[in-house]
Amino acid sequence: MGDILVVAEHLNGQLDEATFELIGMANGLGNTVVALIGGTDEMVSQLGAASKVVKVDAAADFNPETYGAALGAVADAVNPQVVLTTGSSMGMELANSLSAQKSWPLAVAATGVSANGSVKAEAALFGGKIIATTDLGSGPCIVAVVGGSAPADAGRKEGSPAVETVDAPAGAGKVHFKKLIMPESADVDITTKDVLVAIGRGIGSKDDIEVAEELAEALDAAVAASRPIIDAGWLPKSRQVGKSGLKVKPKVYIALGISGAPEHLEGMKNSSTIIAINSDKNAPIFDVAHYGMVADLFDVVEELTEALD
Amino acid sequence: MIFKTMVRKEKEQKSSYVEKDSAIVDGIDISGHWNKMYQPREIMNYDVTPLEDLRALPGAESIGNCYQCAQCIGVCPIDNVGDYGPRKIYRKLQMGMNLLESVDLWQCTTCMNCLRVCPKEVNMIDIMPAAREKAILDGKEVPAELQEMFQNCAEYGNPMGESPRKRARWAKKADVEVKDLSKNPEPVDVLWFVGDYYAYHGRGNDAAQAMARVLTKLGVNFGTLGAEERCDGDSQRLAGEKGLYEMLAEHNIEKFNSLDFKKMVVSGPHAYNAIKNEYPKMGGTYDVDHYTQFLSAMMDKLKPLMTKEFGKKVTFHDPCYLGRHNGEYEAPRTLLNAIPGIQFSEMFRNKEQGYCCGGGGGGMWLDGFMADNINERLSENRVKEAIAVGAEVLAVCCPYEVSRFEDAVKSTGNEGKLEVLDIIEIIDRCIEE
Amino acid sequence: MKIVVPLKQVPDLVEDLELNDDGTGLDYEYLKMKLNEWDDHALEEAILTKEAGDAEVIAVALDGEDVDKMLFTALAKGADKAVKITGANPYAGNHEMARVLANAISGMSPDLVLVGVQSAGDSDGWLAPLLAAHLGMPSVSVVTGLQVSGNTATVHKEYSGGIMAEFDVDLPGVIGIQAARQTPRYAPVSKVRQIQQSATIEEVAAGDLGDVVTSTVEEMKHPEKGGGAKMLSDVEEIVEVLKEKGVA
């Protein structure tokens, strides 16, 4: 059995949380080796849960071409059974690049991986309507894992794993990194958030929005709203979810005081997980929500914010 | 650049006038200088290309008739809450506005109140669809909500983008049998055209189920097109997507023609307008009633069934496409006045002068767009009027309206004060099980 | 400049997805197929690029049910040419589809290939990088901003948290489009019908696929689903759910 090669991901000098999730997952499958391309020594010291780190000196900023070529070189050096990447914008580029370079089978959108003889990946496809199990053979193979599929804590450990450095081949030189563009802080794009705290008419007054904002802050979420809130001018139109607003599909949609009119449901029913809190037990939002609670909004939200802090 | 003048050529004058040097009326000589007319004269040079371009579109010719009297402005429901009206359109065209690229193109709800009062028969009901069609075909920007609705209708045959297979699902909870003629095409007396909102909207389902129960109680032998029914297409036509309208109408007409029925009954005024006035142009002519017409002609049977009291203060909103467009004001009132215990009162603006809910002509799918152009939704304005006349229930008979007005009741802070009910729901409540 | 846009049909999620008898895949006989929404964005970006300068847009698709209508719609929106690849499996995974498309596209000598970054059923990767590998072209995916100047495409690749990276890509290249600059345009029905009467769709054969890397879907099933929401009674339970979903 070969090693499990985890491809570390970093952005703006920070290791991505998903890296630790992958390491935790990999440790349950076999001996974990981490591929760190363009990373720092400081990052290595956070990878104590891996048995070895294979480093490639490369530019700190991701480039699908050079990083892809580097990962090819690491894979040659490690000869892994399974390669795990994140399911992100970067991880998916690397997974596909490696699959094309090595003709190794690839499974994406994975939420779980097993390696008992043959490697199998479970994935949620078609907007979560289908759960598929893919047989990738005995390896080597590649699995791109959806963020949040495993706890990060299991793979997060300070330490000084063995470090091996691999030389990176020059890529074809056709993709040139120019710069990172940081978001303007005032501008919130609710369609890209993993978590949304959405408020509806159940919020009594504009002042009560603060309570929702505190919860959103605790969850690194954004506050979204149904139309009445926007119409009242309490939040800008960029926060509106629904038929005449934006369509969102976050990982978690927390609906506070939203009754669930079809016009609103149209904008959020594809969210992966919907948690609804409403004082009306007959509110239609409970038909589409995965979890519900009948309660006074403010008590719950305040308590929840405290519990999370 | 060629500057045309606003002087119309004589042959284009719609009406002609007679001038006499001397005139005697009822034996009185009324000759005088005062009735001498001057030659039409050029007042100012305008670039009337935009006006002429619009007038050249088939259907939009009458925009040229406007003589700026502004009768329309007084009755335009949009001008009431914003800054828009047929007269203003004409004036802006004179000033060089390209209507096809203006927000004004999408504001008209085709409620027809302007045409009712227009002395020159400037017909926005024809002008707006013609201009919108041109804009859509030319690839001009179409409000995103409206475009999504077109897309949904083209793909699924309903504006919500719901599965066409699930169109007849509501019938499962009607507690009575609803014959699905697409599955079992037996002869029926009445083919009921259910419509999108009755079929798919939660509150529409309530009305559809009520209708099925009432028709059953009345012993009507009826059936529906089930999952084969498609959107009637009228609002799509008025919003400018004529090709889409034709596709939907062709589909429905083909299905209608494959069935054996005596009469068609429709739930909604928009479907009524389409099937009564537009489908015949495409070769589909049917004896069609709006449900209020069908039921009001059966009062001798219906009245004895309504034994439960509905002792509430009720007012009624005239749908533009039942009233002004098709002249039916009495049928819904006949039904409401037969409700046991009802305390009925009219709103200030009723019948011919009824105020538009904002849903017609594509407005149903332009709420987000319109929010930037008006200071109050038309439905909100109307709900306040219902409250002002002391109503506890706002009765409607257009499937667009229940959701529009229920929303407006909430957004105007009148939750709990005004209930919005389809007339068929009230009738259903008055019939003993 | 020549822009090729491969268009893929995917099951319409508005309908319930039926599984085949042995539970290893979807039952395509009962599915309604529609254009992959990301491909629609790729097509829009191609047409916008054409409108901003001088380009020929070629829409390419694997033959299958309703593919003609999809290609006529693309023409109605502004594509200049439509090509249908016959003799291939339109429901194939992206590795196989990339090979089929590469065979057809390489002969077209495109300057730019715009592909929807993903589709709802992707289980074996993304089309853009796999296709790029076969064509020997560079590629960048998850792109929301594209500007072509001479032989260079300047693209904005999205990362999490609203951060983006700007890359210059030497053309020819393959770009995986996340979103076009504007909402994909609507093709009026009468225009589509008119095109249907007048336009033709070119056909090319799929060609030899050689060895394709495959991964076998062993089982497909519907996720377990309760009736409506699972009702919780205290805040601790909500915290647990949030933790389980990896957001707290």
Image (spheres, grey):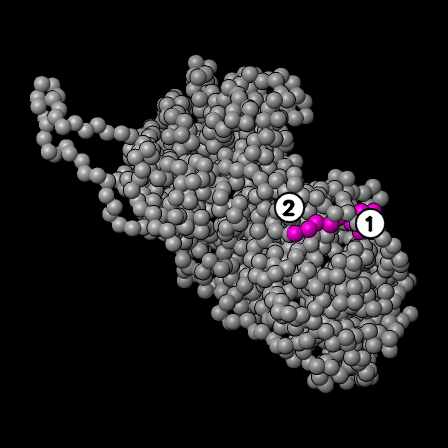
Upstream in sequence: badge 2 or badge 1: 2
Outermost residue toward the top in this view: B300
Q: Is residue B130 left or right of residue A135?
A: left
Q: Quadrant of residue C190?
A: top right
Secondary structure category for the residue under label 2: helix
Q: Would you say residue B60 is visible in this rendering?
A: yes
Expressed as whole percent of the image width and height from the top left, the position of residue A118 reads 89, 61
Kind of residue at disc 1: Ala
Q: Quadrant of the N terminus of chain B?
A: bottom left
Say which mark, if any, is on residue C205. Answer: 1
Q: What stretch of residues is rendered in magenta?
A: C80-92
Q: CA distance from mark 2 to mark 1?
A: 22 Å
Q: Chain of mark 2?
A: C
Secondary structure category for the residue under label 1: strand
Kind of residue at disc 2: Thr
Q: Chain of mark 1?
A: C
Mark 2 highlights which residue?
C73
Viewer-side label of 2, 1? 1
Q: Please tell me how crowded label 2 is: few (under 14), some (14-19), or many (20+) other residues with Cα within 10 Å.
A: many
